[in-house]
Amino acid sequence: MSVKEDLYETTVGLEIHVELATRSKMFCGCSVSFAGEANSRTCPVCLGMPGTLPVPNERAIEYTMKIGLALNCDIAERSLFHRKNYFYPDMPKNYQISQYDLPLCERGHVDIAGDFGETRVGITRVHLEEDTGKSVHMGGTGRIADSDYSLEDFNRAGTPLVEIVSEPDIRSAEEARVFVAELRSLLESLGVSDVRMEEGSLRVDANVSVRRSGEKEFGAKVEVKNMNSIRSVGRALEYEEKRQREALDAGETLVQETRHFDEKTGTTSSLRTKEFAFDYRYFPEPDLVPLAPSTEWVQRVRESLPELPAVRRVRLASEYGLGAADISVLTGSTKTADWFEAAAAAYGGDAKKVVNWIIADLFGLLNEAQMELHETRFTPAQLAGLISMIDEGKISGKQAKLVLADMFESGDDPEKVAADKGLEQVSDAGAIETAVDEVIAENADAADKVRAGQMNTIGFLVGQVMKKTKGQANPGMVNELLRKKLSS
Amino acid sequence: MDLLWASATELAGALGAGEVSSREVTEALIERAEAVDPKIKAYLQRTDERALADADAADERRSRGEMRSAYDGVPLAYKDIFVTRGITTTCGSKILENFVPPYDATVVERCDAAGLPMLGKLNMDEFAMGSSTENSAFGPTRNPWDLDTVPGGSSGGSVALVAAGAAPWAWGTDTGGSIRQPAALCGLVGVKPTYGLVSRYGMIAFASSLDQAGPITRSVKDAAALLNMAAGGDDMDSTCLKEPVPDYLVGIDRGIDGMRIGVVKEFQGEGSQPGVRARVDEALTRLEKLGATLEEVSMPSFEHGISAYYLIAPAEASSNLARYDGVRYGHRSAADDIVQMTSRTRDEGFGAEVKRRIMLGTYALSAGYYEAYYGKAQKVRTLITRDFEKAYSNVDLIVSPTSPTTAFKIGERTDDPLAMYLSDVYTVPVNLAGNAAVSVPCGLSDDGLPVGLQIIAKSLDEKTMFRAAYAFEQDLGLDERPNI
């Protein structure tokens, strides 16, 4: 925001689509999965064949209520499915069963902390709909305009999709990024979705507008699409914010349009302007009855909610005495936090040590391997075991790092790795004493100097003992033993 | 026994007594179709081989005493709106000319489970849009009573076949009168059950909130028996009612002594052909004679029924028929790009009436018009439902003519859609309110063509409806057959 930021205000509202990780599709029994040959996960219902009818997936309704409740929404006593009519070859019925004026969840909020400090972002609605299939355009650049022909894969068609719409309460690219990150970890903690932005199970569209500070009317609304990671949300909106501010500075008029974010260049480009607005001819879906979850059902879902990230953050601070930075890293994903807590529990000592090993050492290995913490080959208990070995003096901190790298590859126990590598410290007093005696005998001159009070020479003797034991002797013990033997 | 004109119940009795085999019945009906179908053109497709194989299997079961139902082996035909696994299902449209469904409609599945051999698929107005079967992409069906007249529609093939003695019964569907009006025009019993009583799964949708499958038969008992087989909850249809279904044959002969029957004030006098009026008036007298008391009921909302229907049904149809785009199945026109492919496919695949209704419905749902058209029509629908509820606080049943006229000449109304739409004036309010109704024959008009009496029941009160229809049918004792 280099451009006269105080002159302008940015307004962002987000629309987030979440593919639910239910076993079966929204309105038929086909399984939800990305795997499998094209069109192998289809049936007459999700192919929109004549005479077929939708039957709602109860689990998907329950997941949607979970999301609504976690976002502090009201659950509607009576909600309707509508048909959204438009022609597109990847949409089997040429209408999408969605929700319109009576969504399942409304009026919620999420608290976030971004570059404007702690703030509350309103949630307008959370509704349930079905996903489309996938068009693959063959030839040309892979976009429909210059392709030779298109193929349709309906495996995804009918996957339950939740749409979350925020109020335009977000005031910067950073707040948008934090909001999406918070939402992602919230959804992950609920266990309702894979929340993988790269794979499209979490899709974010943003409506961005900029106006002069103090103006009542919002600026022209620009919809930004194709942001495939949380980082891209920040980059795309930062670019868009800057573009709009610069345009206003130059006296240009912004138009309502849809823009496409290019990951490579970090810029947005116009896809279509407002004249292409569709008339979806929404009307209540006559093949479905109104959705009226009983209060008992809503209560059951409410009681089934897990600990949400915001609550967990507070607990991690009080229970383990962790700082905000560590907590933020650990709660980026529920699975990361789960892994940490499992390791901390197995270790039983100062949790701070566990955090340090995870963040300072393990994350480096994970980044290189492009893996998540929970995907680590060894278990939280094995990490705890490694830290205990240091505590017990069995290996040095430096050796532990080597052991960790090996465990990361093999998934083996730290004890085994240390033994295999011959890294285990020799703390056996007898073995060390033999080596010390030999070194004293072999280095009579140096020994005499130490006896004469030249204590700086002791380092040389320690080094000789370490050499003799191939570095496995506990240096502290060697030092102590040499002093004892040469002091009399 | 006359295998062609016996009722399904009589055939079931003869099969049970070992007097006849399913194969003999089926062969007789195939032979009859061979003789009369070239004149009436009821069939879109005969499935002779399937029918005979089904019949042999039924005979085989019977010989082992393992009948699937009391009607095991009594053949049946379906309006071509019901999808049949492995058997082309066109819905009377060119756009589905080569569509071979990989699944059976629930109705078909249940009749199959009851052991009813499938004779074939019957002609209809394209996507059930019409009242004469002239809108079929495969040519009109003719009325066996007078080959120059229409059989009514849209279930024209179903009524023509049953009226011509080439099947004891058939399935039809009724969105605004498509079972009752043709049944009336062909002198048959036609039932539009309560919305949600019979699963719509596999019944190609015209207007989802109005469509309902129902039996077309030559006797009231047959209609009750066929409904028994198919009615009741279906996991594949969320709008299908889950309540337990009673046996419609039990108590069907209890008579109507003491029943209160409403006569719709707004449906009297003008509007009906004199011959129709006369037969219906006689019917009212007969009902009184049987012990019912007649009461006039006022249904002021009915005059808006047709207008509301012709907004709601096309609106739903415009969406239901959007799936016919040439991408996944059915007709596909050659084209340079996807937009051209979709529009050409639909232009070539759909007939004029279907296009008219898609446009009407698209318009009614458009932004800025929705409230004035679709929204308002839904309000009329609520008013009609309330008028029914009010009337049923005083009466058990309501009666009216089924159709304002007897069968009209082929071509007579094809250029005048509005005149065609008015064929449904007495039947449409029932679909809008969702309750049950039956058309029963009440004699012939002066022109020698059949007239139907519509008996309208409360939602899910099919039992009372069948009782009255049966009492009336038995007392009237009609013994007229078309001369074909």
Image (cartoon, grey):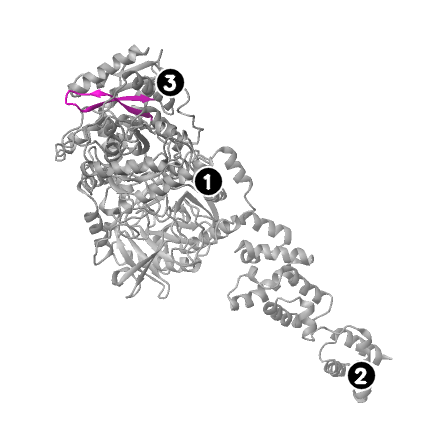
Local packing at callout 3 (Cα closer than 10 Å; few below 14, some 14-19, many 20+) is: some
Mark 2 lies on residue: A450
Q: Chain of mark 1?
A: A
> Which residue occupies the foreground of this view, A349 or A69?
A69
Q: Is residue B40 visible?
A: yes
User: Can marks 3 and 1 be said to lie on one chain?
Assistant: no
Q: Amino acid at mark 2?
A: Val
**Other residues around mark 1 within 10 Å, as few (<14) / some (14–19) / many (≥20):** many
- The label nearer to you, 3 versus 1, is 3
State which region is magenta.
Answer: B435-457
Q: Is residue B81 left or right of residue A372?
A: left
Locate residue A406: give its quadrant: bottom right
Q: Amino acid at mark 1?
A: Cys
Give the chain of mark 3.
Answer: B
Q: Which residue is mark 3?
A: B253
Question: Could you say which is closer to the camera, residue A143 or residue B141?
Answer: B141
Same chain check for tags 2 and 1: yes
Which quadrant of the rendered structure holds the C terminus of chain B?
top left
Crowd rating for badge 2 (residues with CA inside 10 Å; few <14, some 14–19, many 20+): many
Cα separation between marks 3 and 2: 124 Å
Residue at which label 1 appears: A73
Q: Is residue B367 visible?
A: no
Quarter of the view holding residue B474: top left
Chain for disc number 2: A
Q: Earlier in the sequence, mark 2 or mark 1?
A: 1
Q: Amino acid at mark 3?
A: Asp
Residue A134 in the image, given as x and y percentages of width and height: 35, 56
Q: Which is nearer the eye, B480 or A104?
A: B480
